Image: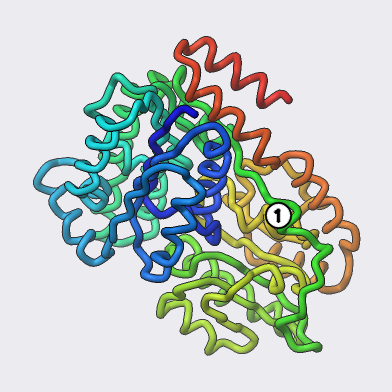
Amino acid sequence: MDELLYLVHRIPYPPNKGDKIRSYHLLKHLAQSYTVHVGAFIDAEEDWQYADALAKMAGGEVKLLPLKPRWATLKSLYGFLSGEALTLPYYRDAQMQRWVDTTLSRHPIKRVLIYSSSMAQYLVQHPQLQRVVDFVDIDSDKWRQYAEKKTWPMSWVYQREARKLFDYERRITHAFAASTFVSEAEAALFKQLAPDCADKVFGFSNGVDTDYFSPTHNFPSPYAAHEAVLVFTGAMDYWANVDAVTWFANAVWPAVQRAHPAARFYIVGSRPTPAVLALAKLDGVVVTGGVPDTRPYIAHAAMAVAPLRIARGIQNKVLEAMAMAKPTLVTPQALEGIAALTGKELLLANDVDTFVRLVSDVLAGHYPSMGESARERVLQDFSWSRHLRIVEQLLKQTAISELHTATAQVNAA
């Protein structure tokens, strides 16, 4: 079996949050064809327990190093002196570089998959390899969006990061065999921003495990019998999620609860920040913190909401709710990359009044067949096995024309 190096900025196991879902399924797919050597960081103590399971899944060597966010933040400040994006020193580690170089010297590795732009720095000195980087999202554009929400001096810091990181993303795209993004829309935006890189840019969507996220499971309800629940799921230390639930709880929720006294807004996700915890003081808002399984919370909710105002790429929380046949209300930012019919397969709102009206409509039972239609959309468009064939082609092909031909065939399948 051929050997492959897979570098990930966060341990790709278990698939319990957005980035780890995609990185996990990439590893699972690659391990069918390769002995995979995995290098990754661990930024949460509870993830160390999964080291053995990851090694068994990969089949090759595994190097896991701790990443302490406070120390990494301090390291990142070196970027101001070096003139580079702060993201790079944040994830730079001499021990990881030594492991990469040693692993490449000890094994007949010809192909490398890098997950997240921050890990590409470990392969810059190895141009002889077939290097594919999955950027997932345009991270530089996230920093641009953050800058728009902040005041000086952080707005300046974020603007600088957006500019420096975009320059780095362009250089990596030029140097590597191919770069991928989480959707055709995300790939198209990067091509628009960096037209000189267009021939090396591809998109492949996330998928959903539709057997796991299925409405047929018989979960006990985590809610009281009288509650009509709106649920938001996601990592609650991620700023885009924090911004979304804070805005919704303060701007939309009061009007919803006045109209529907039994309504409850459940915020379900690990590591809630102080700002998120403070929302539990509002009438009808519940912050659960981390839960063993989000599916019961989705299954027994009246609807799911994804009021994201800052977002890039496809939102797994939206696909999972749709797969569980749940009416789902989203902003345009959360809809990116999902070609669903609004009003039939999901609901779309971009202002407070529309959010309030559509929540009321769902709670009043106005969309009885939306959940079924939503699941059919996911079954049709979001198969992991079909989308990940693109990665196989990118790792094997060398000619740009062959790459685009193979990718087009997969996307058309």
- Asked whether residue 153 is in view, the answer is no
Look at mark 1 in the image and give the residue it sits on: 348
What's the residue at 63%, 20% (across, down)?
Answer: 408
What's the residue at 29%, 52% (across, down)?
Answer: 158
Left or right, 247 with respect to 60, comes to right
Left or right, 389 with respect to 244, comes to right
What percent of the width, then of the height, locates residue 252?
63, 73
What's the residue at 31%, 36% (across, down)?
Answer: 120
* Structure colour scheme: rainbow
**13 or 133: nearer the eye?**
13
**303 or 102: nearer the eye?**
102
What percent of the width, then of the height, locates residue 226?
80, 88
Q: How many marks?
A: 1
Quadrant where the image shows the C terminus = top right
Vertical relation: 349 (above or below) 183: below
What percent of the width, then of the height, locates residue 162?
32, 44
Left or right, 343 with respect to 241, comes to right
